[in-house]
Image (tube, rainbow, N blue to C red):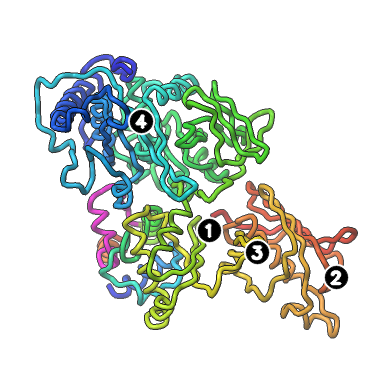
Amino acid sequence: MHWSSLFGYTNDNSPMCYRHNELYTFGQFKQQFGEACHALRAELSMLEPKEHSVQSHTDCTPLAALYSDDSYEFCVWLFAALACGIQLIIPSNNKRATAQSLPNLKFWLGQWKHSTAMCLNALPKNKCAELLQTFTGSIQLFTSGSNGKPQRIEKTLQQLHYEIAAQQQHWGTLVDTTTVLATVSHQHIYGLLFKLLWPLKTGRTFVAKTYVNIANLLRDAEKFSPAVWIASPAQLSRRMENWPWEKASALRAIFSSGGPLASNDAEAITKLTGKAPIEIYGSTETGGIAWRRQLANILWQPLQSVEVNCTENCLLKVKAPWISKIISSQDRVQITDGGFHLLGRADQIIKIEEKRISLTQVENLLQSSVYISQVKLLPIKQHRECIAAVIVLNKLANTELEAYGKNVLVRKLRALLEPDLDGVAIPRVWRFVREIPVDNQGKSPRALLMQFFDRTPRAMLPEIETYSVENYSARISLSIPATLPCLPGHFEDSPIVPGVVQVDWAMHFGRELLNIGGQFFAMEVIKFKQLLIPEEKVQLELEFNQKKNKLNFRFHCQSNEYSSGKLCFTNV
Amino acid sequence: MNELISELKLLIIDVLNLEDITPEEIKIEEPLFGEGLGLDSIDALELGLALQKKYKISIDAESELTKVHFANIKALAKFVGDNRSK
């Protein structure tokens, strides 16, 4: 791509970026870009002749990894590398495991622990550096693959710009002349597009840092008004009333991506800022493909020129000008006339606070420790979503557990993962068990593992015969052994399942199968119609109303209804 | 100071829902984030909010000083002690 199609600034004095309380103009950027190109070319010329020939085969194209938490520095290296025909790898972090997984790199650009890393501050000044104008290199982004290994997704600048064109067509008028403030990183595709490439293309200014403090962001939004906020659910869900929300009137729009925004957060943000957040749905593989303002319409609307479809197994299929072939994702969807619903992942990839995590990768890391003979991980929702580990310890670990206690062992296991993983990928809840339960297919489904996290002791629960879960509802066939300790004592000699036990079971299975977090605080319209006698087979129907945070339950068999009601939970 | 330290330990365990750990097991000079107690970036957000609510202090999550205040329990107790509304 040529220079002119990437940058929309009218002249060298155009403001481009606010960084460390200073304004950087487009001219200043060009100067540093030239210097970075010069430095890279000098390094390239020292490589073997066959290696630095830009036109040669891809396997000879020099590779560089780029990481910086400063979007301005990132931007300088990004374009300098692409102008020099370098293939750029943009990982999500600069952790040890990431660096080790990137062999045969010629350059480390930005913030790396490597002694040879090239950073902006150390760049020699060069007044007459030549300004390269064509960008031929490509970009590789990382995402968690199903097989546990990070997966590289290759993108060309052209592809990224096709998506920018689609976003611009949709939101161009809304974001025109705004300054971009972000609470997400440009190391991921969403930030890369929304915080950097899109403003550059349309000649808008951006703030180089990633905001952590929303109060500061709001103050700056007023200072740099009009502004847009590139956000994600992690920040939109954590608010304080006393932040200067009145300054949000300087915001033209709030974008949110990385995962669906909870409905109560969408409502609260709309109330506080007067702007209904625009959610963008997409992935590293597909780029952005759909949007919604959920308070107006809960369905995801595909962006213009995007075609969505689904496979027999409800997996989403996407076709868009910015992806080279039709992509079948692992996201399950339900497509209707007016858009689509997202139903969750079909594989071992989960998202915690927008970070895509491969449970297989974390399992493999744990499995390789000297303490563990078997491990299974699962996401659970306690006060927030986190990873839980069910572990069978080996002899060595059990000896240490006995000698020093659980806390010490857990710390050791965490310390083992810390150099390689983002914080949220490290298990938060640990259960050391004698064996990992399996069903008759030899698998360990969630329902079996959840027993270790139950708030209701296992001995107090009926047996699940079959169950099915769909969206936010579940049907469970239960058999009630007469031996359950919670049954006798109500009426002499004729045990029944007391009402309070039924309510407890409904809550238990609701938490387990429908993943309900929040604290229980009230019951509504509870009815007990007929006595439920042990040894009976009974159906439990559960339906969770996400909007109201209420769980509807109903115990019945074909002809009889035993009980029904609603359990109310606080918002998490 | 000791009272505040115990209070902060309980607050951290409670707000961040830390399991399997007692206040005695949190050492006052061990790092809260990464190694040590193993808190993550989301914990930082939540802990910041909880402290602002409970002690009516304001915390600038982006200031370099905040990193120093949040380094460990000892530093945090000093920061909260110096800044809370009495």
- Give neighbour class at mark 1: few <14, some 14-19, many 20+ (Cα, 10 Å): some
User: Mark on residue A180?
Assistant: 4
At x 15% / y 37%, what residue is drawn? A121
- Write down the chain letter for disc 1: A
Residue at label 1?
A: A378
Task: Answer yes or no: are tags 1 and 4 on the same subunit.
Answer: yes
Label 3 secondary element: loop
Question: Helix, strand or loop at disc 2?
Answer: loop
Considering only order in the chain, which callout, 1 or 2, is on the residue closer to the N terminus? 1
Q: Is residue A330 magenta?
A: no
The magenta span reads B57-76
The residue carrying pointer 2 sits among few (fewer than 14), some (14 to 19) or many (20 or more) residues within 10 Å by Cα, namely: few
Discs 2/1, front: 1
- Report helix, strand or loop for mark 4: strand
- Tell me the residue that label 2 is attached to: A531
Is A341 placed above or below B82 here?
above
Q: Are marks 1 and 4 in contact (CB under 8 Å)?
A: no
Q: What chain does badge 2 belong to?
A: A
Q: Give residue A439's mark.
A: 3
What separation in Å lies between label 2 and label 4 (alpha carbons)? 62 Å
